[in-house]
Image (cartoon, rainbow, N blue to C red):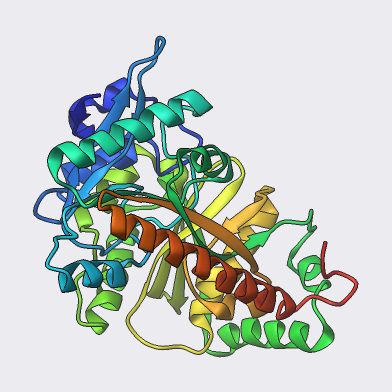
Amino acid sequence: MPTVTWHAHWAAASGTQHNPFLRSSFLSTLEQTGVCSENSGWQPEHLSLNEGDQPLWMPMYAKTHSWGEYVFDWSWAHAYEQHGLPYYPKLVAAIPYTPSQGPRATQPLTASQVITLAGAIEDRVRGQAYSGAHLLFPDTETAELWRQTGWAERCDVQFHWKNRNYRDFDDFLDRFSSRKRKNTRKERRSITDQGLNLRCYEGTDISLETLHRFYVFYHATYLKRGRQGYLNRAFFEQLLARQPETLVLFMAYEGEEAVAGALCFRDETSLYGRYWGCLAEYNNLHFETCYYQGIDYCIRNGLQRFDPGTQGEHKVARGFEPTLTHSFHWLAHPDFKDAVQRFCDEEAEMVANYRQQMIEALPFKATADGE
C-alpha cells in the first residue's frame, strides 16, 4: 500500500464526504498551510487501498509527540523511556487536532478491508521502526469492525447533546428539573444583563474580517496558557474558501465590538464545536457561545447531535449526555503490547463507572431519565 501526502493526491479521494473532517479539502488544507508537516510532528503517511473504481484512503501520520491527539498516552511514552526504548515516532490514524468521532476512511469499510488495513499498518510499523500504531476516535461502525483485529481497545467519555425532536430551546429545558432549568435561564439572561449579544454566521456569510477577528480570539486563548495555537490563519482562510458550507461561526458582541467567538462545523445531521476564543472574561459567555448557541442552532436546523468537543464535566449540567468514545492501539514490542492491553482492560471498568456517575448527574427530571 503506497504512502502519500494528501495535498498531492487529494483529487483522487472523494470530495463529498458526509463528515466535514474527512473531506479532501480539510485534510489537504492541513498540509498546504503547514499545520501537518514534519516540522509540526504530524508527518503525513496516508494509506491507500485500491479496490474497485474508487481508491480508499485512510489519513495517517507519523508522530514525534502526542500533542493534538486527545487520547493521552504520555504514561506509555514515559514507560518506554524508563526502559531505554523509543516511543516516538509512532503511527496515528486520526483527524489531526480533532477529537471527534467519525469515519476513518474515505469510504465505508468492510470487515475484509479492515483486516487488510490493520495488517498493512502493522507491517509498516515493523518495517519502519515505529513503536506502534493508534486508531483514534473511530465512529461506532468502524470501531465495531476494528475489534476483530485484536488491537487493544481504549474507552473514554465525551459529552454530546442529542435532539429529542425539540420544538425550541424552552421545549428542551422542559426536560430539566425545576432548579436546573432556573439555573440555565439565569445563565442565559446574564448575557443580556452584561450588554452582550450573539450573532450566527454561516458559510459564505462569514466575512474575512469576521474570520480574522475570530482568529485573534482563538490565538489569544492559547497564549493565555503559554502556548501557540495549533492552527494558523492561513488554515482558517483556506477552509472558508474551500468548504464554507460546513462552517458555522457564533460571535459575541458588546455593542458593535466583537469580544469572543466559537467556530463550529456541521454536516447533514450533526454540529461539531471545535474552536473558541475571547480576550476578556464575561460571566457565562463561554457557556452561551460554545453550548447554548449550538443547541439553539441544532433545534432550528433539525440537526440530531451536537458534539461540542472533548472533556468538560460542566457540560453535564447543561444537558450534554456522557457518550463513550473509542481508540485502538497496537504496539510492536510484545511485553508493552501485553501491558497496554491490561491497562486498557482495567481503565475500561473505571470509565464505565465514571460514565454512570455522569448519567446520574444529568439535569433531567426523573421521568426523562433513561430515554
Q: Is residue 182 above or below residue 54?
A: below
6 sits left or right of 141 in the view: left
Q: Is residue 108 above or below residue 87?
A: above
Q: Nearer the viewer, residue 151 or 262?
A: 151
The residue under the point 24% across, 45% down is 61
Q: Position of residue 274 (x, y in %)?
A: 42, 60
Q: Is there any visible trace of residue 110 in the rendered image?
A: no
Give the position of the C terminus as an image quadrant.
Answer: bottom right
The residue under the point 67% across, 50% down is 304
**Quadrant of residue 81 in the image?**
bottom left
Q: Is there any visible trace of residue 90 in the rendered image?
A: yes
Q: Nearer the viewer, residue 201 or 324?
A: 324
Give the position of the N terminus as an image quadrant.
Answer: top left
Q: Position of residue 242 (x, y in %)?
A: 32, 37
The residue under the point 78% across, 56% down is 164
Q: Position of residue 96 (x, y in %)?
A: 31, 52
Q: Is residue 76 above or below residue 163?
A: below
**Quadrant of residue 231 in the image?**
bottom left
Q: Position of residue 147 (x, y in %)?
A: 52, 43
Q: Is residue 206 above or below residue 314?
A: above
303 sits left or right of 290 in the view: right
| Outermost top residue | 53
The residue under the point 24% across, 71% down is 79
